[in-house]
Image (cartoon, helix red, strand yellow):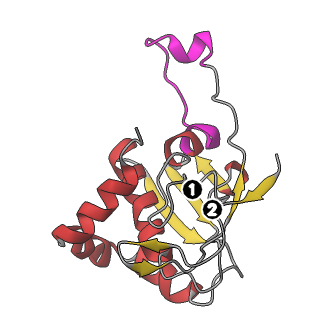
Amino acid sequence: MGARPVGGSGAVMAAGLRLENANPLIYGRSSERPLTAREQDGLEADCIDGREIFDLIRSINDPEHPLSLEELNVVEQLRVNVNDDESSVSVAFTPTIPHCSMATLIGLSIKVKLLRSLPERFKVDVHITPGTHASEHAVNKQLADKERVAAALENSHLLEVVNQCLSARL
């Protein structure tokens, strides 16, 4: 799975603002996981695994580019950890640049997608891959604070941006 730069030369604009990473590398998408007969059988309890979590978050749209988090290599299956017995999910994400101002928004989008998709019993931890962002500690602190996350989602403009990141591209 190789990477290739996107875009051309010159300044790239989004909503009148200069993009921080105008020419990110684009990575290939992994294939869809086929459902097994056991998974399709609605009578049997199905454990949630890392691939299932990755499939939930891989298609989240990047807030700056018309690309998914998977295509930008912001999320990878190997950075998803699930313990179904302990009802915990941990996702590390890697911003495309060390000073990405969208890191908190990306983390919030991942967290909201998982909170909306998983049974309530799950504790969801979303954080930046260690050593990949200049403000890693501050962003992780915001994402781990339930009250801050709830307050952010009460902001109608921010919630609209998160929902755009979560909406399917046509």
Is 66 in the magenta? no
The residue tagged 2 is 74
Query: Image quarter for residue 4?
Result: bottom right
Query: Image quarter for residue 131?
Result: bottom right
Vertical relation: 52 (above or below) 143: above
Q: Secondary structure at mark 2?
A: loop
* Image location of residue 124, percent across then percent down: 46, 58
Vertical relation: 70 (above or below) 8: above
The residue tagged 1 is 69
Q: Amino acid at mark 1?
A: Leu
From the viewer's perspective, is 2 left or right of 59?
A: right
Q: Which residue is depicted at the point 56% across and 39% down?
A: 55
* Image location of residue 91, percent across then percent down: 58, 59
* Image location of residue 78, percent across then percent down: 73, 52
Name the N-terminal-most of marks 1 and 2: 1
The answer to whether mark 1 and mark 2 are in CB contact below 8 A is yes
| Magenta-colored span | 35-53
Of residue 68 and residue 90, the one placed in the foreground of this image is 68
From the viewer's perspective, is 46 left or right of 23?
A: left
Q: Which residue is depicted at the point 49% across and 82% down?
A: 101
Of residue 37 and residue 57, the one placed in the foreground of this image is 57
Q: Amino acid at mark 2?
A: Val
Q: Secondary structure at mark 1?
A: loop
Residue at the far right: name it: 2
Q: Which residue is depicted at the point 40% across and 38% down?
A: 170
Of residue 70 and residue 152, the one placed in the foreground of this image is 70
